[in-house]
Structures are given as structure tokens and as C-alpha cells.
Amino acid sequence: MDQVHIRYAATALAVSTGRVQVHGAIKDNVHGVLACAPMSGSCWVDAGWVDWGSPDGPSPHGSGDSACGAVTVNPWIGTAETGAKPDLLRVDCGQSSDPFQPARESASQFDAAVSGLDQLCEADGFDDACEAALKRPGSGDCSLP
């Protein structure tokens, strides 16, 4: 996936099996890239040349969106600006053995927050905001493994 721009999602990209290449921008998400455990052999994500929303790269190394699991992030857009020499393989970021648990929790919290909009959406004058919020990509049913 080249020139991909993923923003404002609970999880920008979740990979549990297979090999994926993503290049472009992954920023302003709750979680950036969640992949299987490093060295598990069940998946691999090449996320080099990605704009993580910060020149110091993805968290936990930098302050951009997270990259956890079997994810290659070097070089990212902004590496030359900071002179950073990051690890090629991201770590589990302190997650449980299930790297998708934080994404499921985020989706659940988001769904709970949005469910309160039903009452507000019944009031006059909020039609456009309600339509945008309820149809926002990444909202509603989040089918993670």
C-alpha cells in the first residue's frame, strides 16, 4: 500500500498474519500499527517511509503514532531531520501476549462514547455533526481478530 494516509482511527493498521507493506502517513490515531509479536514468524509489516506525525518517529521511540510488534519503521519520514538511528524492529510496547487487546479496548471505549450521541442527534440543529460522527471511518463495529 503506497501513498496511504490513515488518520483518526482507533487502530490505523492491525496485522495478525502475512506480510504487509505500507508507505505514506499514519498519524492522529489512537494506535498506529499493531502486528504479531516480533520473531513469531506469523506476520511482518514494512512501515518504512511513513510519516508518523512526528519527526522523531513512532512511539515508543518517538512521539508519533505507535508501532508495536513485528514492524520495520526505519527510515521514517523525518529521520534525516533528527539524525535518529532507531531500532528496525519495534517491541511489544508492554502489551499482553495479544497485541490486538489495546485496539479492542479503544474500539469499545469509542463505541461507548458515540452511543451517547443518539440522544443529542434527536435534537434539532445537530444533523450534520451527528451524520459525520456516526459514519466516521473506524467507528462502530470494529472487527479485530
Image (tube, rainbow, N blue to C red):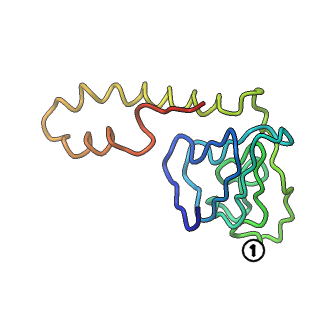
The residue at the point 32 percent across, 42 percent down is 135
Is 83 placed left or right of 48 in the picture? right
| Picture layout, residue 141 above or below residue 138 | above
| Picture layout, residue 13 above or below residue 121 | below
Is 137 placed left or right of 29 in the picture? left
Please state the horizontal and vertical placement of residue 22, each as a whole percent of the image. Answer: 63, 59
Check disc 1 and report the residue beneath it: 81
Q: Amino acid at mark 1?
A: Glu
Is 68 placed left or right of 7 in the picture? right
Q: Total of numbered circles in the picture?
A: 1
What is the quadrant of the N terminus in the image? bottom right
Please state the horizontal and vertical placement of residue 55, each as a whole percent of the image. Answer: 70, 65
Please state the horizontal and vertical placement of residue 115, each as a whole percent of the image. Answer: 35, 26
The residue at the point 12 percent across, 36 percent down is 124
Please state the horizontal and vertical placement of residue 75, each as a whole percent of the image. Answer: 77, 67
Q: In the image as oriented, which residue stretches furthest toward the left?
A: 124
Helix or strand or loop: what does disc 1 sit on?
Answer: helix
Q: Nearer the viewer, residue 30 or 142?
A: 142
What is the quadrant of the C terminus in the image? top right
| Picture layout, residue 137 above or below residue 107 | below
The residue at the point 79 percent across, 63 percent down is 74
Asked where in the image residue 35 lies, by quadrant, the reply is top right
The residue at the point 74 percent across, 38 percent down is 36
Asked where in the image residue 94 lies, by quadrant, the reply is top right
Dot 1 surroundings within 10 Å: few (below 14), some, or many (20 or more)?
few
Q: Nearer the viewer, residue 1 or 72?
A: 1
Is 140 placed left or right of 103 in the picture? left
